[in-house]
Image (spheres, rainbow, N blue to C red):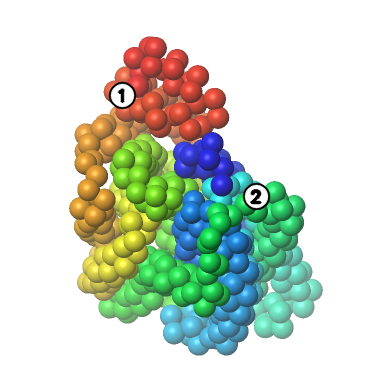
């Protein structure tokens, strides 16, 4: 275990990796969305919306469980048990991954038909092998996270993202070009006659989306190759010293401990991802009901925002594709940053709790929530304030889709704040030994979301614009209840103004200044440049507010490289709390 590096160092490593991954992901998603449009992105996202709950069920609990168990065993000097845990996990979850892959291939057609989107079948099938390789990656990442080494997790994520960018765009463009060439030569697309170029472009979308998804599967293979290489090179450097008189745990006991922790974490993740699954099933079906009830009203809400060739039978897929393909990726950027806080906090909290250091538990908890809030509030408020300009900057060739979904993204920005804060709270509950609570709370929140979707999305006057309401209701409840439970269990005293109040004020100032900066520059410059300048002004104002309000504390900065010198400099100028 790397005792000289705390969880904040791990957070920084994962955070930098996540930023790189998200930049590469944007480079992937932006041209892909511009290629596929709303309808094609609905096929692409249908595959992901089935994959994520299965991934959560089979994979998500593995890194958290391994990280917790390995960090505890290392803290107690049980080195061999820690290494044995990895071998048990690899054997077990490789088998589970194979079963999950087979299930996803078997159910691809049935699932696509269930949600009234049969054209998505090929994309679902192409994504299935990712479950197997994802299981292997989860085991290796969890092992190194338990050793408080976040480098392999961060680097493997970058390798994955780069491979997805290369293979995904390559296969998607190849499929699209092949279909169009066939149409120009014979009037058919993959053997199906087409009457016009517009119809041909729609006909290539299922294969093109499947090609993009195949690139995702290739990226998971690349991630596994990197992690195996890293493990072979670095594992021998872990000291083999073990305390005397320790009786090694049996494989059965270790496997039981692994599932005892992984199962509730998996269930919590399933239910968390179930919110996306709820969107997929309920939103598509309720949109179809709204279109059947009063499609004319829905069309009148989006004048000049429905591309030619899209009739009533494809309108639900188009609207859902705008939501899942344009708005959701922007929304997901925000909680992806705070996820790394929870990942790196979990082994630190588990180790501290294992040796009874509750003072360190309390300090780590408060610091993690403050750092999460410093990301969540400016990003969430900023997306709310600049929803339309941000979407037009990213998806410049899809102005119709942006017009449809920009109003919904404003509310999603607020929802993202609550989601971002829920993630470290859930990780802390897991570290405290109450992994069951996130499951129960997310299940109740999912019921809120399903009810909101059913009642509101089916109203023709609201349609897709009502989809974010359920997410907001879900995570507002989960955060409030989870935070209260965490404070009660840990007996930590949370300084609400310092941890949440001041970051919220700084975030609001950031968003307001960014919006006003955009409005001013947009009178003189292009919208894209105005958006970037507005964001830059917002970021500058945010930094000024962070230091003038003295939000950061010395211990927040101590554990990053050269943090002591930086902290002393800030303290000298009275810029720390």
Q: Quadrant of residue 29?
A: bottom right
> Of tags 1 and 2, which is closer to the observer?
2
Whether residue 155 appears in this view of the structure is yes
- Answer few, some or many: residues within 10 Å of disc 1's Cα (few below 14, many 20 plus, some between 14 and 19): some
Measured Cα–Cα span from mark 1 to mark 2: 39 Å
Q: Nearer the viewer, residue 460 or 127?
A: 127
Residue at 56% across, 61% down: 82
- Residue 260 pos. (x, y %): 41, 72
Classify mark 2: helix, strand or loop: loop
Marker disc for residue 577 = 1
Q: Nearer the viewer, residue 516 or 489?
A: 489
Residue at 31% across, 78% down: 289
- Residue 221 pos. (x, y %): 70, 65
Marker disc for residue 239 = 2
Residue at 74% across, 57% down: 232
- Residue 153 pos. (x, y %): 59, 52
């Amino acid at each position: 275990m790397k005792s000289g590096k705390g969880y904040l160092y791990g957070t920084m490593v994962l955070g930098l990796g996540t930023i790189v991954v998200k930049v590469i992901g944007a480079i992937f998603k932006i041209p892909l969305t511009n290629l596929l449009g709303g309808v094609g992105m609905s096929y692409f996202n249908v595959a992901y919306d089935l994959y994520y709950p299965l991934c959560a069920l089979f994979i998500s609990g593995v890194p958290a469980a391994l990280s917790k168990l390995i960090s505890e065993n290392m803290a107690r000097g049980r080195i061999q048990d820690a290494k044995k845990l990895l071998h048990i996990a690899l054997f077990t979850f490789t088998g589970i991954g194979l079963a999950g892959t087979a299930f996803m291939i078997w159910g691809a057609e049935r699932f696509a038909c269930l949600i009234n989107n049969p054209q998505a079948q090929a994309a679902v099938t192409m994504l299935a092998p990712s479950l197997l390789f994802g299981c292997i990656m989860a085991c290796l990442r969890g092992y190194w996270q338990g050793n408080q080494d976040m480098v392999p997790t961060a680097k493997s994520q970058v390798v994955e993202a780069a491979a997805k960018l290369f293979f995904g765009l390559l296969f998607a463009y190849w499929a699209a070009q092949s279909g169009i060439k066939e149409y120009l030569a014979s009037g058919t697309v993959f053997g199906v006659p087409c009457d016009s170029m517009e119809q041909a472009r729609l006909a290539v979308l299922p294969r093109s989306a499947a090609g993009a998804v195949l690139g995702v599967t290739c990226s998971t293979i690349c991630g596994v190759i990197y992690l195996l290489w890293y493990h072979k090179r670095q594992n021998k450097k872990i000291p083999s010293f073990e305390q005397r008189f320790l009786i090694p745990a049996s494989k059965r006991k270790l496997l039981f401990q692994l599932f005892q922790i992984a199962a509730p974490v998996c269930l919590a993740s399933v239910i968390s991802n179930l919110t996306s699954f709820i969107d997929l099933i309920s939103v598509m079906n309720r949109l179809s009901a709204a279109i059947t009830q009063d499609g004319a009203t829905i069309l009148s809400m989006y004048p000049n925002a429905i591309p030619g060739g899209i009739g009533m039978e494809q309108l639900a897929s188009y609207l859902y594709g705008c939501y899942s393909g344009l708005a959701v990726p922007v929304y997901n950027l925000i909680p992806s940053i705070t996820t790394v806080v929870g990942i790196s906090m979990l082994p630190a909290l588990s180790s501290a709790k294992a040796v009874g250091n509750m003072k360190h538990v309390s300090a780590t908890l408060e610091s993690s929530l403050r750092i999460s809030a410093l990301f969540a509030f400016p990003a969430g408020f900023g997306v709310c304030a600049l929803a339309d300009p941000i979407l037009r900057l990213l998806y410049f060739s899809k102005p119709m889709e942006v017009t449809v979904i920009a109003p919904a993204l404003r509310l999603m920005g607020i929802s993202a704040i609550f989601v971002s804060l829920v993630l470290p709270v859930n990780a802390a509950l897991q570290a405290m030994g109450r992994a069951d609570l996130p499951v129960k709370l997310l299940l109740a929140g999912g019921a809120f979301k399903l009810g909101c979707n059913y009642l509101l999305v089916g109203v023709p006057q609201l349609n897709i614009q009502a989809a974010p309401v359920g997410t907001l209701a879900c995570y507002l409840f989960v955060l409030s209840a989870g935070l209260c439970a965490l404070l009660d269990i840990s007996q930590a005293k949370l300084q609400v103004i310092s941890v949440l109040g001041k970051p919220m004020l700084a975030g609001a100032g950031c968003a307001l200044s960014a919006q006003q900066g955009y409005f001013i520059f947009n009178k003189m410059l292009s919208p894209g440049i105005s958006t970037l300048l507005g964001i830059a002004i917002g970021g500058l104002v945010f930094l000024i507010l962070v230091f003038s309000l003295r939000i950061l504390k010395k211990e927040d900065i101590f554990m990053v490289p050269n943090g002591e010198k930086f902290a002393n400099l800030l303290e000298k100028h009275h810029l720390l709390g």
